[in-house]
Image: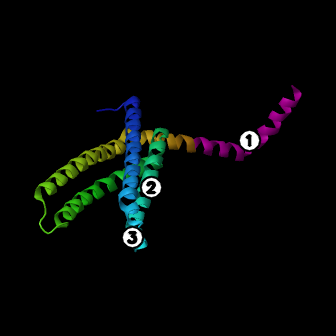
Amino acid sequence: MEMSDRSIRDGVLLISGYHYFLAVLALVGVAAVIIYGIVPQLGGEEVLGAVFVPVLLVLLGLVLAGFYVSVGLGLPKYRNSSRLVAIFLSVIGILSGFVAVLGLMVIRITSTLVPNWIAVIMVGMIAICVYALIAFMDVFVLVFLFNGRVREAFYKTDLDTDVDVLLDDVEMLSPESEKTLPAQTNKKRRR
C-alpha cells in the first residue's frame, strides 16, 4: 500500500501527539513519586537514604519527559534526529514495560507472607493491559517510522536543507562567482 504525503503528515502528527501524551504521563509519574515517595520520608531520621531512590526516579522521569517533548516538537518539522530518538524511545518503552510488569508482579507477590492472590491477579491484569496498549502504540511508531516513504520524507527534508546550504557555500567559493560579483556591482552602480 502506497502512502500519500498527507497520510505521512497525519501519521507524524499523531506520533508527535503521542509523545506529548507520554511526556504528560512522565510528569504525572514524577508528581506521584514526589507525593508518595519523597514527602512522607521527609520527617524521618534517615532522610537522605530514604529519598535517594525516589529522587533518582524523579530525575529519570524529568529526563524522559524532556526527550518526549523534544521528539514531539521535532517530528512535525521532519527532523531525522527526532525520528531516531522516537525509535529509540519506542524500543526502550517496549523492553522496560515488560520488565516493569514482571517487577510489579514480583513486588506484589513478595510484599506479604501470604499474598492476596486476588489483588495480585488484578494488579497483574491492569499492568498487562496498560503495557499491551503502550507496547501496541510503540510497535505502531516503529513500523511507521521505519516505512520507506516516511524515511524518505525525513531524509528529503534534511537533505534539501543541507544541499541548499552546500550549494550556497559552493557558489560563494567558486572562481566564477568572484568574476561575476564585481560585474554585478558595477551594473548596480550604473543604474
Q: Which mark is residue 177?
A: 1
Query: On the picture, is 12 further left or further right than 164?
Result: left
Q: Are marks 1 and 3 in contact (CB under 8 Å)?
A: no
Please tell me which of labels 1 and 3 falls first in the chain. Answer: 3
- Looking at the picture, how far across and down is residue 44, in whole percent? 39, 70
Q: In this picture, which residue range is highlighted in magenta?
A: 163-191
Rounded to the nearest whole Å, what is the CA distance between mark 3 and mark 2? 25 Å
Query: On the picture, is 171 further left or further right than 148?
Result: right
Q: Which mark is residue 62?
A: 2
Front disc: 3 or 2: 3
Quadrant where the image shows the N terminus: top left
Query: On the picture, is 97 further left or further right than 79?
Result: left
What amino acid is labelled 1 in the image?
Answer: Ser
Q: Residue furthest top?
A: 191
User: What type of secondary structure mainly makes up the magenta span?
Assistant: helix
Residue 27 falls inside the magenta stretch = no
